């Protein structure tokens, strides 16, 4: 039996562990030695990442951005905003936000991104074929999220519409087309109080004109059937007076309907109009009562034949519609003047021109980022390789790694 002769002379003596926590200290020189040991790998990965990124950036198609600046119509402030304006600027903005009051810029940005404007731009520039998109909803989404960018400057009130495209001329044309389509859409919408009144009176005029035409045809048919009837001048004046009074009552009722859309019950103008309407109705009641009883009498029916009564009723309807049409026409013209005074036309401050400088790809920035990423990845790979080498130098870890690889290759073959 061989006796233990002690440690081998060729085996280097094991140095004792450092006292305290010296073994846990980070040695920067060791890290530098590892980096210098694998410096070719670090330099290769870093330069390779920078070179590949530079080639990709050169292959990528340049993208240009065209911008147009517009001034939206400035609507007159409402009563609530006028009251809020007496406070400080911060209170005014807070109250407007709390009440949900939007600025004109927010309104027109929403109109620019609407489906109506988007569909017109898609059809005008054939974007579905250009972007190779099958469905229109996807073309709208790309136009709103990747192509169009709208910004509202709260201080100046100006709106900037930006379009990004690979063709600089098409980018400028699309930006200007957005303004044209937005202006076209704005003309057909009642976005102001005057425009709403103008549309209301316009509808009333159409109805009154149709009723007046019907009354004229009815009068013409009666005259053709019975011949021309000569009635008493006093009865004719009475008919015209009652018709005119009824027309004034109808006009006042229309005016009250419009006022109730933007006024409260405590509005002095609304209360005065209601009082005037009550007075006119009382006067009409007195006139009709003096002329006789029954349903809608104008004159005592015993003084005129049946044909004359029909004639006067038809004449009354005709005069009523003619007077009502004239009154509504005046209100309509006033509403048109108010609408024109508010200047609802979108004004172009800066028209879009074809840009000469691309916005992407930003080649220099891409190469710098890729260089830093490549460097950090290479450093990580170097320390990973070094750790693997040290770990495999221990026989126990080497056997574990060999078993793991065998198990992995067995599963792969299976």
Image (cartoon, rainbow, N blue to C red):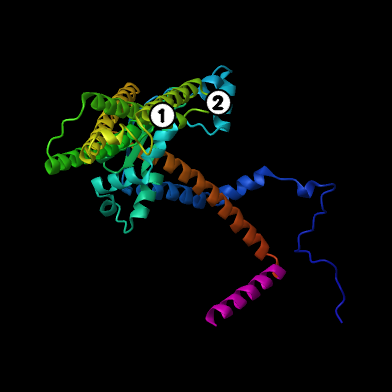
Q: Quadrant of the C terminus?
A: bottom right
What residue is shown with label 2?
93
Label 1 crowd bin: few (<14), some (14–19), many (20+), radius 10 Å? few
Label 2 crowd bin: few (<14), some (14–19), many (20+), radius 10 Å? some
- Residue 230 lies in what quarter of the image? top left
Q: Disc 2 or disc 1, which is closer to the eye?
A: 1
Q: Give the range drawn in magenta.
A: 396-414
Q: What element carries label 2?
A: helix
Residue 313 in view here: yes
Q: In which quarter of the image is the N terminus?
A: bottom right
Q: Is residue 137 magenta?
A: no
Residue at screen point 55% across, 31% down: 97
Query: Which residue is at the front of the view, 149 or 167?
Result: 149
- Expressed as whole percent of the image width and height from the top left, the position of residue 283 reads 40, 24
Residue 348 in view here: no
Q: Does the magenta stretch include residue 401?
A: yes
Query: Which residue is at the front of the view, 408 or 149?
Result: 149
In the image, residue 59 sits, relative to residue 305, either above or below, namely below
Q: Is mark 1 on a helix, strand or loop?
A: helix
- Residue 285 is labelled as 1
Query: Which residue is at the front of the view, 366 or 5?
Result: 366
- Expressed as whole percent of the image width and height from the top left, the position of residue 388 reads 63, 61
Q: Give yes or no for contact between labels 2 and 1 (Cβ–Cβ under 8 Å).
A: no
């Amino acid at each position: 039996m061989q006796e233990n002769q002690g440690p081998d002379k060729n085996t280097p003596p094991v140095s004792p562990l450092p006292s305290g926590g010296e073994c846990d200290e980070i040695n920067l020189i060791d890290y530098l030695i590892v980096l210098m040991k694998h410096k070719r790998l670090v330099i290769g990965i870093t330069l390779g990442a920078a070179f590949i990124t530079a080639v990709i950036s050169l292959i990528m198609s340049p993208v240009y951005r065209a911008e147009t600046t517009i001034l939206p119509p400035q609507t007159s402030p409402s009563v609530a905003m006028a009251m809020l304006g007496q406070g400080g600027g911060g209170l005014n903005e807070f109250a407007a936000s709390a009440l949900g009051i939007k600025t004109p810029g927010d309104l027109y940005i929403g109109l620019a991104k609407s489906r109506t404007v988007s569909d017109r731009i898609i059809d005008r520039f054939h974007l579905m074929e250009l972007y190779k998109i099958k469905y229109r909803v996807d073309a709208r989404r790309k136009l709103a999220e990747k192509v169009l960018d709208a910004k509202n400057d709260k201080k100046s009130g100006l709106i900037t519409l930006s379009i990004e495209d690979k063709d600089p001329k098409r980018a400028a044309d699309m930006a200007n087309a957005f303004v044209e389509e937005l202006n076209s859409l704005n003309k057909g919408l009642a976005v102001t109080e005057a425009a709403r009144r103008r549309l209301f009176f316009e509808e009333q005029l159409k109805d009154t004109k149709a009723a007046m035409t019907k009354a004229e045809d009815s009068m013409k048919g009666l005259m053709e059937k019975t011949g021309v009837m000569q009635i008493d001048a006093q009865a004719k004046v009475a008919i015209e007076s009652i018709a005119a009074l009824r027309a004034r009552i109808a006009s006042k009722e229309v005016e009250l309907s419009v006022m109730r859309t933007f006024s409260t019950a405590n509005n002095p103008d609304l209360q005065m109009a209601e009082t005037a309407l009550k007075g006119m109705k009382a006067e009409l009641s007195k006139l009709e009562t003096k002329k006789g009883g029954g349903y809608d009498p104008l004159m005592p029916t015993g003084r005129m034949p049946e044909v004359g009564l029909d004639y006067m009723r038809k004449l009354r309807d005709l005069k009523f519609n003619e007077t009502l049409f004239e009154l509504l026409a005046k209100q309509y013209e006033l509403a048109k003047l108010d609408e024109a005074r508010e200047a609802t036309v979108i004004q172009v401050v800066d028209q879009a021109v074809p840009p000469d400088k691309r916005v992407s790809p930003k080649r220099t920035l891409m190469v710098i980022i890729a260089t830093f990423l490549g460097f950090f990845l290479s450093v990580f790979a170097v320390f990973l390789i070094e750790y693997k080498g040290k770990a495999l130098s221990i026989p126990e870890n080497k056997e574990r790694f060999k078993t793991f690889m065998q198990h992995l290759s067995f599963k792969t073959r299976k």
